[in-house]
Amino acid sequence: MNVSRLSPFTALCCLILVLGMFSGCSRYDFYDGEIFDCDCGYMTWDGRNLNMRMAEVEQLDSETFRYHIVADVRTRDEREAREEPRDVILTLSTALNGATTTIDLDGGDDALTIQQVESAGASLDWAMSGATVLIEVRDDKHVMNIASLSATRGNNTIDATGEVTFDLVD
C-alpha cells in the first residue's frame, strides 16, 4: 500500500495560501468617501454653491490679518462621482480698522489672490478684477461677507459672493 505524504515545503505553501486568502477578505463595507464641508459659511462661485473645505485666519501683527478660504469647485455630479479634487483658494491680507472694516479692491490688487488647485498639484491663478469685502471682528470669530468678487482666467470670468466665519476658538 502506497500512502503519499505532504512534504513540509508543500504543507507550508498551502498554509501561506490559506492565510493569504483569509487576510485578503474584508468584512467592512466599501468606503465610498465623504464630501467634507467645514460648516464655516458659504460661497457662490459663478452661480453655483460651493462646498466649503476650510476657513482660517492668522494675525500678522496688531492690525493685520491674513484670511485663507478653500472651497471645492467641482460640480455636484463630479463630487458624487468621486472625481479628483479641484479647489479654489482665496487669500486676503489686510489691516482692520475697528470692529467692522469694508475693503474695496481694484483689479490686480495683491491683497487678494485667487488660485485654483488641481489634485495633481497644478495651480492656476485667477486675476481678480475687483472685490468688495466686509469683515466683522468679534471676540470669538471674524465674519467675512464677500459682497462682490469678480475674477478672470483666460476667457472665463466669474462672479462670486459669500459669507465665511473664521472661528478663533480652538
Image (cartoon, rainbow, N blue to C red):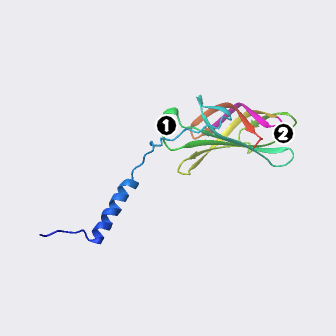
Q: Is residue 91 left or right of residue 25?
A: right
Location of residue 36 in the rendering, given as x and y in whole percent from the top left corner: 59, 39
Q: Is residue 133 found left or right of 123 in the rendered image?
A: right
Between the residue at mark 2 and the residue at mark 1, the CA separation in whole angstroms equals 38 Å
Which residue is at the front of the view, 32 or 78? 32
Percent x, y for residue 82? 48, 40
Kind of residue sitting beneath label 2:
Leu
In terms of secondary structure, where does tag 2 sit? loop
Residue 65 seen = yes
Outermost front residue: 1
* Residue 146 is covered by the magenta coloring: yes
Looking at the image, which residue sits at the far left? Answer: 1
Going 86% across and 44% down the picture, which residue do you hit?
63
Find out whether residue 108 is within the magenta segment.
Answer: no
Residue at 45% x, 44% y is 28
**Residue 111 seen:** no
Q: Which mark is residue 96?
A: 2
Q: Identify the residue under disc 1.
A: 78
From the image, which quarter does the N terminus lie in? bottom left
Viewer-nearest residue: 144 or 153: 144
Label 2 crowd bin: few (<14), some (14–19), many (20+), radius 10 Å:
some
Q: Earlier in the sequence, mark 2 or mark 1?
A: 1
Q: Which residues are magenta?
A: 138-151
Mark 1: amino acid: Glu
Q: Secondary structure at mark 1?
A: helix
The count of marks equals 2
Count neighbours of disc 1 (C-alpha within 10 A) and say few if under 14, some if 14 to 19, many if 20 or more. few
Q: On screen, 168 above or below 42? A: below
Q: Are marks 2 and 1 in contact (CB under 8 Å)?
A: no
